[in-house]
Amino acid sequence: MHFKLLLTFVEDSKTDEVVEAAREAGATGSTVINNARGEGIQKSQTFLGLTLETQRDIVMFLVEEHLSRHILETISKVGEFDTSPGSGIAIQLDVEDAVGVAHQATELAEKVEQEL
């Protein structure tokens, strides 16, 4: 079985929505790293020396490769990445090998068969 790693950088107010949507789209789990910061094309605004920016979370999903694009598109839609500038991004990386996911292999195999 081959996997992809989806790295999602999302506003902390949308993290739960993104995780739930990814699960409904086929992700079997996630890892959330709280309180990340980032900057896009435009610099963050400041007020009296304080930066006015929302907190970001990094959400990682290890998903089966045949489900990855659908999950990525679902994440993008729910997070409003393409419609609202600065709301977040998601990227997909190839995973050469993974351990600790054998317990999910049966469920993943069933989902992949349904998709194909």
Image (tube, rainbow, N blue to C red):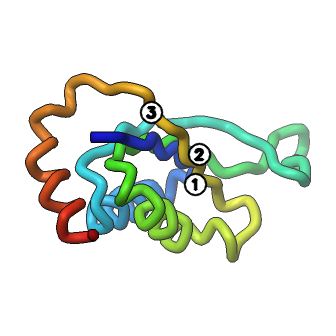
Q: Secondary structure at mark 2?
A: strand
Residue drawn where x is 50% and y is 38% of the image: 94
Q: CA distance from mark 2 to mark 1?
A: 4 Å
Vertical comparison of 104 with 115: above or below: above
Q: Residue at x 36, y 25 (%)?
A: 97
Amino acid type assigned to the residue bearing label 3 in the image: Val
Cβ–Cβ under 8 Å for marks 3 and 2: no
Residue at image coords 89%, 38%: 49
Question: What is the crowding at mark 2: few (fewer than 14 residues within 10 Å), some, or many (at least 20)?
Answer: many
Q: Secondary structure at mark 3?
A: strand
Which residue does the image show at 32% across and 49% down from the upper left?
Answer: 64
Q: Write down the residue under mark 2.
A: 56
Residue 43 vs 31, above or below: the answer is below
Real-space CA distance between mark 3 and mark 1, rounded to the nearest whole angstrom: 25 Å
Residue 27: image x %, image y %? Answer: 30, 54
Mark nearest the camera among 3 and 1 is: 3
* Residue behind mark 3: 95
Label 3 – label 2 distance at C-alpha: 24 Å
The C terminus, quarter of image: bottom left
Query: Badges 2 and 1: C-beta atoms under 8 Å apart?
Result: yes
| Residue type of the residue flagged with mark 2 | Arg
Dot 3 or dot 1, earlier in sequence: 1
- Nearer to me, 20 or 90: 90
Q: Residues within 10 Å of mark 1 (few under 14, many from 20)?
A: many
**Residue that carries the numbered disc 1 in the rendered image:** 11
Q: Give the quadrant of residue 51.
A: top right
